[in-house]
Amino acid sequence: MGKFDKYFLMGIDDILEYTLEKLPDIGWDKAAMQAKEIGDGNLNYVFRVWDDKGHSVIIKHAGVSLRISEDMKVSTDRNRIESEILQLNDKYAPGMVPKIYFYDTVMSACGMEDLSDYQLMRYAMMEHKTFPKFADDISTFMVNTLLMTSDVVMDHQEKKALVKSFISPELCQITEDLVLMEPYNDINGNNHVFAPNAEFVKKELYEDTALHLEVSKLKFKFMTDAQALMHGDLHTGSIFVRPDSTKVFDPEFATYAPMGYDIGNVVANLIFAYDNGLAAGDTAFSDWCLKAIEETMDLFVEKFNKKFDEVATEPMAKVPGFKQWYLEGILNDTAGYAGTELHRRTVGMANVKDVTTIADEEKRAWVERLNILCGKDYIMNQTKFRTGADFVAAVKRAQEAAK
Ligand code: SR1
Ligand code: MG
């Protein structure tokens, strides 16, 4: 029996041998091969392997426990789901995800394209870099991957086979708890609340029963509306950027759920980037963040309308009025889930560095209140957000109200 024929949690010392076993024919300069752990995500172990002849690969490996918490156990099947979804995404949004070279269901690891010439978008945002193609790219990615996997386009039996193949109950549960419940009740004691805002959080999130009702609807919608095969964690830590290109990765939370969950995540995470720019007084950057939100939403709507007409196969989806009703539902959900993402990243278990690294406590408290109020506006007024400008106006309103 070979070393990698039975699952164990690999460490840095195993990775070169593993890479050579899985990718023996790349032409590696074996004597010069090196490996480094480069991941800083909450779940997995990510290694870069390279030599001095220009060969390199990323090995992503799933552990039984999550990195963020030893107590959280999640099926290592997430690595298969991620690999298969990236391959599917590449079909619908060519060139917008890393190439998968192999995936291994025994070791729960995959080898994928090394994107070292890209930067993780969250870190680029924290350096206040701007990316002129981002809104165009991400709107294309979302329209293509979401619409093409929906019942509007897919044969319904084939779609149901995908629903079955990509169901990941434990990862869904993380979203159901961490995103769609705990920010409103801290029922499991997981929340990280910035102390200066403790009273504000209690009043605005824990004690607002009207808000709880709307979030409960969003939670049940997430659990029951198998609308499209969405990424499930489309934040700026799941996106690599270069000025000329955007790549989406890390879709292990992918499942069939409302399209608006992904779109709302993009909106909310651009607001976290905005927070950082605002706190630093970098108006050029914070203006760019708002422009990116506006353009992403407007381009999404424009491209969705066009593509729907080109690709819809379901006869009842072509009934006059259906497309508009369907799109309005997506926009409602986008606002709702942008709100829950704003809340959970501000007070929940998994916070974002854009905000937590703001050294000035007063400014951090201010932008955190902005996130909470903007999120509430999105959740409580879901039907009012129809254009990019509508989404941006809520940020500006919250910014003033949070002072
Ligand atoms: C327990 S995992 C916490 C978060 O990290 C992932 O990136 C997801 O966003 C998840 O909610
Ligand atoms: Mg991730």
Image (cartoon, helix red, strand yellow):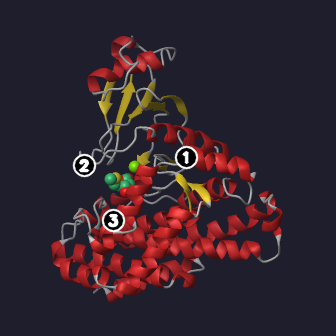
Q: Which disc number belongs to residue 394?
A: none
Mark 3: give few (<14), some (14-19) or many (20+) Cα within 10 Å. many
Ligand 1 image-quadrant field: bottom left
Residue 327 in the figure: left or right of residue 51: right
- Quadrant of residue 94 in the image? top right
Give the amino acid at mark 2: Ser
Residue 292 in the figure: left or right of residue 402: right
Residue 288 seen in the current view = no
Q: Which disc number belongs to residue 345?
A: 3
Label 2 sits on residue: 69
Give the amino acid at mark 3: Arg
Q: Position of residue 221 (x, y in %)?
A: 53, 69
Residue 396 in the figure: left or right of residue 156: left
The one nearer the camera, 242 or 399, is 399
Q: Position of residue 262 (x, y in %)?
A: 52, 61
Q: Quadrant of the N terminus?
A: top left
